[in-house]
Image (spheres, grey):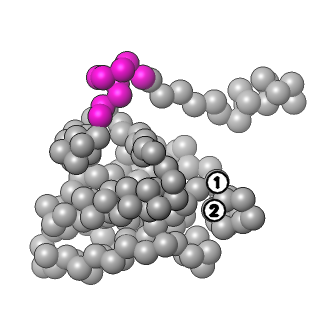
Amino acid sequence: MASTRIREARERDCADILRMIRVKPAGWKTECRGAGSGVVGAGEELAEYEQLSHQVKISEEALRADGFGENPFFHCLVAEVVPASGELQGQGIGTKIIKKVAEVALQKGCSQVRLAVLDWNKKAMDLYKSLGAQDLTEAEGWRSFRFEEEAMKEMAGC
């Protein structure tokens, strides 16, 4: 079984975090996706795995400012994985990561964790449901929306 250590991200991790968001490092196998959870660093990088590389617009500087500045917009955890022989899939890495997210969220006073999952990522959906998550699309009919920068500028009159 893989050895997994999950820790708080540090500002000096920003370059690696951005790389994991954008592209797959040389030598990593495409089929290794950690429990299929789509979690960054579990194998194939998030944008590439979700076929959304063209939407990545953040810079390392923005990650630093937004995550490690005076009023951070996000909280980041890093999973350091020393793989056992063979594939990472099925070794419980995704479960360990999501359980740590729940632990940190509770420590910070959160009453829920919301996740965005693409409709084709059945493994991730199955994992989250097995851990007690509700599929709000099924249960409540919620849909996710996003305003891109151009639409925001138009709304703001810029």
Q: Which residues are magenta?
A: 134-142
Q: Answer whether residue 30 is visible to the viewer in this image.
A: no
- Which amino acid is tagged 1? Phe
Q: Where residue 86 sits in the image (x, y, percent)? A: 12, 73
Q: Nearer the viewer, residue 84 or 139?
A: 139
Residue 78 in the magenta stretch? The answer is no
Q: Where residue 139 sits in the image (x, y, percent)? A: 30, 23
Q: Residue furthest top?
A: 141
- Which amino acid is tagged 2? Gly
- Which residue is found at the position 33% from the left and 52% from the top? 38
Residue 126 picture quarter: top left
Label 1: which residue?
73
Q: SS of the residue at dot 1?
A: loop
- Which residue is found at the position 82% from the left and 27% from the top? 156
Q: Where residue 5 sits in the image (x, y, percent)? A: 33, 77
Label 2: which residue?
67
Taking 81 as reference, is 33 above or below it?
Answer: above
Q: SS of the residue at dot 2?
A: helix
